[in-house]
Image (tube, rainbow, N blue to C red):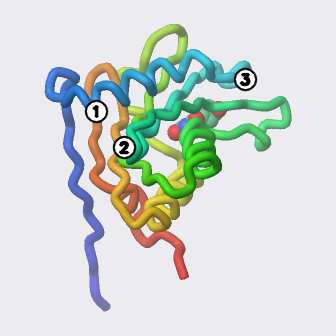
């Protein structure tokens, strides 16, 4: 038997440590929470993607009374980017969430299905997608979507 350790390195940042470029994307993700449609969970998630052409696209979670028909903010955003700008890499993806009128203290982290989509988008664009997970207490910076999903399905 052999044991292997799959570890990733993440950065924990305070808002004051962010560059202007990153802060702008996070601010757009925070703004995107406002248009979330989350009448069932009341958990409003926003995402913003900075494309390599300088555009910042926003998305948010869209729920539905037939619960599984809804979609997370990350996939709404990434699919919209790929649908409209298929040849532009997503350089940065920022995610924020608010509930009860307040942004979450802890960073919001993508679900498993979104991680699979983020990984494939990164593979497809052949360039790293940096991810910033916003919380009022701390911001997590992940250098590549692949880090979110060790042993991702691929063939
Ligand atoms: N949600 C997201 O949009 N992104 C995440 O990373 C986690 C969860 C949504 C799905 C659902 O609309 C609500 O948050 C509560 O789970």
Q: In the picture shown, does residue 35 fall above or below 64? A: above
Q: CA distance from mark 3 to mark 1?
A: 31 Å
- Whether disc 3's CB lies below 8 Å from ligand 1 is answered yes
Q: In the picture shown, does residue 23 fall above or below 100? A: below
Question: Do we see residue 70 in this rendering?
Answer: yes
Q: Earlier in the sequence, mark 1 or mark 2?
A: 1
- Whether disc 1's CB lies below 8 Å from ligand 1 is answered no
- Mark 3 lies on a secondary structure that is loop
- Mark 1 lies on a secondary structure that is helix
Report whether 42 appears left or right of 122.
Answer: right
Q: How many marks?
A: 3
Q: Earlier in the sequence, mark 3 or mark 2?
A: 3
Q: In the picture shown, does residue 53 fall above or below 124? A: above
Q: Residue at x 73, y 23 (%)?
A: 40
Q: Which residue lies under the disc numbered 3?
A: 40
Q: In the picture shown, does residue 46 fall above or below 2? A: above
Give the camera-side residue of 146 and 8: 146
Q: Tell me the crowding category of disc 2: few under 14, some 14 to 19, or many 20 or more residues within 10 angstroms, Cα based.
A: many
Q: Which residue lies under the disc numbered 2?
A: 92
Mark 1 touches mark 2? (CB < 8 Å): yes
Q: Position of residue 38 (x, y in %)?
A: 68, 23
Name the image quarter holding the N terminus: bottom left
* Image quadrant, ligand 1: top right
Q: Tell me the crowding category of disc 1: few under 14, some 14 to 19, or many 20 or more residues within 10 angstroms, Cα based.
A: some
Q: Earlier in the sequence, mark 3 or mark 1?
A: 1
Q: Position of residue 143 (x, y in %)?
A: 27, 52
Q: Which residue lies under the disc numbered 1?
A: 22
Q: Nearer the viewer, mark 3 or mark 1?
A: 1
| Furthest residue in direction right, as rendered | 66
């Amino acid at each position: 038997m052999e044991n292997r350790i799959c570890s990733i390195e993440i950065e924990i940042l305070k808002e004051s440590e962010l560059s202007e470029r990153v802060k702008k994307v996070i601010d757009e993700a925070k703004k995107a929470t406002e248009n979330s449609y989350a009448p069932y969970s009341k958990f409003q998630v926003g995402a913003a993607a900075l494309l390599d052409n300088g555009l910042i696209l926003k998305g948010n979670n869209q729920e539905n009374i037939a619960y599984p028909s809804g979609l997370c903010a990350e996939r709404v955003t990434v699919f919209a980017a790929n649908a409209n700008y298929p040849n532009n890499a997503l350089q940065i993806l920022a995610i924020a969430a608010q509930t009860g009128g307040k942004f979450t203290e802890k960073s919001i982290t993508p679900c498993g299905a979104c991680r699979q989509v983020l990984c494939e988008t990164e593979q497809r664009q052949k360039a790293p997608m940096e991810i910033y997970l916003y919380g009022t207490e701390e911001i997590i910076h992940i250098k590549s979507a692949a880090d979110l999903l060790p042993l991702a399905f691929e063939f």
